[in-house]
Image: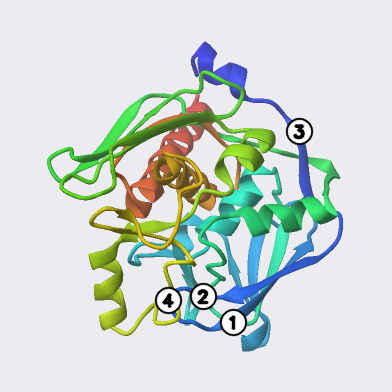
Amino acid sequence: MNNAAAKSVVSRPQQTLRQSVAVVGKGYWSGVENRVELRPSAAGSGIRFIREDLGGACVPVSLKNRVAATKRTNLRVGQVAVEMVEHLLSALSALGVDCCEVGLTAAELPGLDGSARAYVEAIDSVGVQPLSGSLIEPLVVQSPFTIAEDSSSSLVEVHPPTTDGLRVSYFVEYPGSSIWPQHYEVVVTPERYREDIAGARTFLLEEEARKLQESGVGLTVTTQDLVVFGPDGPLENELRWPNECARHKVLDVIGDLFLSGRPFHGDVTARRSGHRLNAEIVEKVLAAEAGTARVSGAS
């Protein structure tokens, strides 16, 4: 491990919530109301989704439980699924919640206003506390690599950390649309997340929204529930920041990187990437870590 990576490994106790708190809302895709109850959990338990509507079936947050899905991150164990988990995972990760039981009354998490703000407010309302006797081990990028697709129009570059944690830089490009090129870069801390990232909302083009509704999903979603871009910009809505789209993509990256169940330490630069490439980052860093461990064990 080089010096940049080594400086990022800051040990701290695992953390959980001080008490339970709930967020209620309808899923974007299904329109089904879901009560999401965030509960304190023991050290070493990680993040676990509990389908109360299915008798308490458990879906742990793990890269191996991720399944392919359109424009969202879904998890599945056997026949039990949880859907659109990235916004909640983003908030939990950024605020340092390592262990949490998440009770659900339906498969799809609420879309809310398209951001992670409601989850942050819920977590902050009860607070976070350390769990004695167990330290958290970050997943640290030890060497640079690049993942690309579509002739490199979509790519993610990862480097060992230059800060004590995660830095994300995202470039949004939608050629030929009303979504202008934009960029956002941030060293992720709880404070920066609360102020500059949590409120950034999901966005899509009007034609994408129309096709989804024609296929029978998102029928309850309106232009007030997220940011829909028409030919001249947002429809019946106003942006919270000129680069809100890039900020939301950073929010998604943070959530997807938490599929490892551990803090992610590294510098991530992404251009036009989505949930699949974000998951591939985690896969490659985990594989590199496992390879290093095998080499060390054999020496």
- Label located before the other in sequence (3 or 1): 3
- Picture layout, residue 257 above or below residue 221: above
Q: Does the residue at mark 3 contact the one at mark 4 (Cβ under 8 Å)?
A: no
- Picture layout, residue 179 above or below residue 111: above
- Residue at the image position 23 percent from the left and 66 percent from the top: 207
As drawn, the label of residue 33 is 1
Nearest to the observer: residue 178 or residue 35:
178
Q: What colouring does the structure picture have?
A: rainbow
Q: Amino acid at mark 2?
A: Gly
Dividing the picture into quadrants, the one containing residue 206 is bottom left
Q: Residues within 10 Å of mark 2 (few under 14, many from 20)?
A: many
Q: Does the residue at mark 4 contact the one at mark 2 (Cβ under 8 Å)?
A: yes
- Residue at the image position 65 percent from the left and 42 percent from the top: 194
Which structural element holds mark 2? loop
- Label located before the other in sequence (3 or 4): 3
The residue singled out by tag 4 in the image is: 29
- Residue at the image position 27 percent from the left and 38 percent from the top: 155
- Label located before the other in sequence (1 or 2): 2
Q: Residues within 10 Å of mark 1 (few under 14, many from 20)?
A: some
- Label located before the other in sequence (3 or 2): 3
Residue 45 lies, in percent from the top left, at 71, 57
As drawn, the label of residue 12 is 3
- Residue at the image position 33 percent from the left and 66 percent from the top: 70
Q: Does the residue at mark 4 contact the one at mark 1 (Cβ under 8 Å)?
A: no
The residue singled out by tag 2 in the image is: 27
Q: Does the residue at mark 3 contact the one at mark 1 (Cβ under 8 Å)?
A: no
Residue 256 lies, in percent from the top left, at 47, 50
Q: Does the residue at mark 1 contact the one at mark 2 (Cβ under 8 Å)?
A: yes
**Residue 267 visible:** yes
Which structural element holds mark 4? loop
How many numbered callouts? 4
